[in-house]
């Protein structure tokens, strides 16, 4: 999947979690479902769950999945991110949406990608330097304690 972000940013998706609605091969009669597919069965995904949640709403079906990854800026800056991809399929229930999506035909829908960059704290060089000097000072103080004189034995 490609996201055009003004030719300045690219998204590297590192993880797409499995869907968490009730599992179903067809989504028949369900207002909320995570489609299953035998081709997706692996030891870590024994139910063959897809990443999608199909949720019925007032206008049709919302098709959503989570994303986790890294956003890269052309200048070299990066940030971790997590988000939700949300597509709205108007006028269809989850069963019809799944049939359309897996039927091999193309269809149009509106979609949004909501991302939240996550901050990673990196200590400033000055903080590391001052901490090191403090530890060195403590070591010198401890090492410079006067030794107690030995009392000669009688």
Image: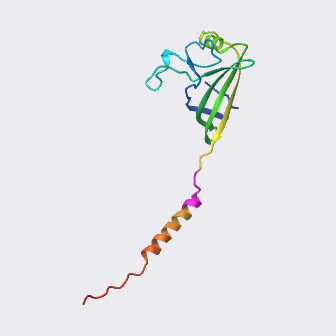
> Dividing the picture into quarters, in which one does residue 111 lie?
top right
Image coordinates for residue 125, horizontal then vertical, percent = 57, 58
- Residue that sits furthest to the right in the current view: 59
Image coordinates for residue 69, horizontal then vertical, percent = 58, 35
Determine if the magenta segment contains residue 28: no
> Dividing the picture into quarters, in which one does residue 54 lie?
top right
- Residue that sits furthest to the bottom in the current view: 154
Query: Residue 71, relative to residue 23: is it above or below?
Result: below
Q: Residue at x 58, y 12 (%)?
A: 26
Query: Residue 37, relative to residue 80: is it above or below?
Result: above
Q: Residue at x 66, y 37 (%)?
A: 116
The N terminus appears in which quarter of the rendering?
top right
Query: Residue 14, relative to residue 128: is it above or below?
Result: above
Badge count: 0
How is the model colour-coded? Answer: rainbow
Q: Is residue 38 left or right of residue 92?
A: left
**Residue 122 vs residue 50, the one in the foreground:** 50
Residue 76 visible in rendering: no
Q: Residue at x 64, y 33 (%)?
A: 83
Image coordinates for residue 33, horizontal then vertical, percent = 60, 19
**Residue 100 vs residue 80, the one in the foreground:** 100
Q: Is residue 66 left or right of residue 139?
A: right
Query: Residue 20, relative to residue 94: is it above or below?
Result: below
- Residue that sits furthest to the left in the current view: 154
Image coordinates for residue 102, horizontal then vertical, percent = 59, 12
**Residue 105 vs residue 150, the one in the foreground:** 150
The C terminus appears in which quarter of the rendering?
bottom left
Task: Please report the bounds of the magenta region as a residue range.
Answer: 122-128
Q: Residue at x 56, y 64 (%)?
A: 130
Residue 40 visible in rendering: yes
């Amino acid at each position: 999947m490609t996201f055009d972000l003004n030719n300045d940013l690219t998204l590297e998706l590192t993880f797409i979690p499995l869907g968490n609605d009730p599992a179903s091969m067809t989504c028949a009669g369900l207002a909320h479902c995570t489609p299953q597919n035998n081709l997706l069965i692996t030891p870590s995904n024994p139910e063959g769950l897809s990443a999608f949640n199909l949720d019925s709403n007032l206008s049709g079906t919302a098709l959503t999945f989570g994303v986790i990854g890294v956003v890269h800026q052309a200048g070299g800056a990066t940030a971790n991110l997590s988000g939700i991809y949300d597509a709205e399929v108007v006028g269809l229930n989850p069963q019809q949406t799944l049939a359309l999506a897996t039927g091999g035909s193309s269809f149009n829908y509106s979609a949004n990608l909501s991302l939240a960059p996550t901050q990673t704290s990196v200590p400033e060089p000055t903080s590391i330097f001052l901490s090191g000097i403090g530890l060195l000072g403590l070591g010198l103080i401890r090492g410079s304690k006067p030794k107690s004189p030995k009392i000669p034995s009688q």
